[in-house]
Amino acid sequence: MSVAKSGRTTGLTCGVVEGVNGSINVDLPADCGSQQHQTVLFRGQGIMNGIVKPGDSGSLVVDAGTARPVALAAALSSGGDFSSGNDVINA
């Protein structure tokens, strides 16, 4: 599925959903309420190619053809290659 998102950092970006109900590792720096760096596993995510950058979290991800909401941008993978989105409407 082709998707689009308008984020604070990157503005309008387009991409493709690579998978559904996926899992990615997300790095959390020590300054997020913890004394040390952590890697957290996010499960049940929509996986998209890197359309999200830091500062875009919470952006609405829509079907590029219909503008139908499909997810909220949640996080970047540890390597920054993939974005995750929490499903807002099941297909």
Image (cartoon, rainbow, N blue to C red):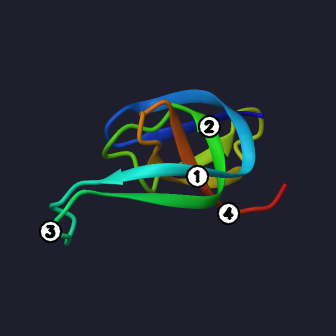
**Number of residues whose C-alpha sits closer than 10 Å to that of mark 3, classed few (under 14), some (14–19) or many (20 or more):** few
The span from disc 2 to disc 3 (Cα, nearest Å) is: 31 Å
State left or right for residue 9 relative to residue 65: left
Q: Which residue is mark 4?
A: 88
Question: In which quadrant is the N terminus drawn?
Answer: top right
Residue 54 — which label?
none
Mark 3 or mark 2, which is nearer the start of the sequence?
3
Q: Which residue is mark 1?
A: 85
Say what amino acid the circle numbered 4 marks. Val
Asked if the residue at tag 4 contacts the one at tag 1, i.e. Cβ–Cβ closer than 8 Å, the answer is: no
Q: Which residue is mark 2?
A: 48
Camera-side residue: 64 or 84? 84
Q: Which residue is mark 3?
A: 35
Give amino acid for label 3: Gln
Where disc 3 sits, the SS reads loop
- Percent coordinates x, y for residue 10 in the rendering: 37, 32
Q: Are marks 1 and 2 in contact (CB under 8 Å)?
A: yes
Residue located at (47% from left, 39% from top): 6
Q: Is 45 placed above or below 10 here?
A: below
Marks 1/2: CA–CA distance:
8 Å
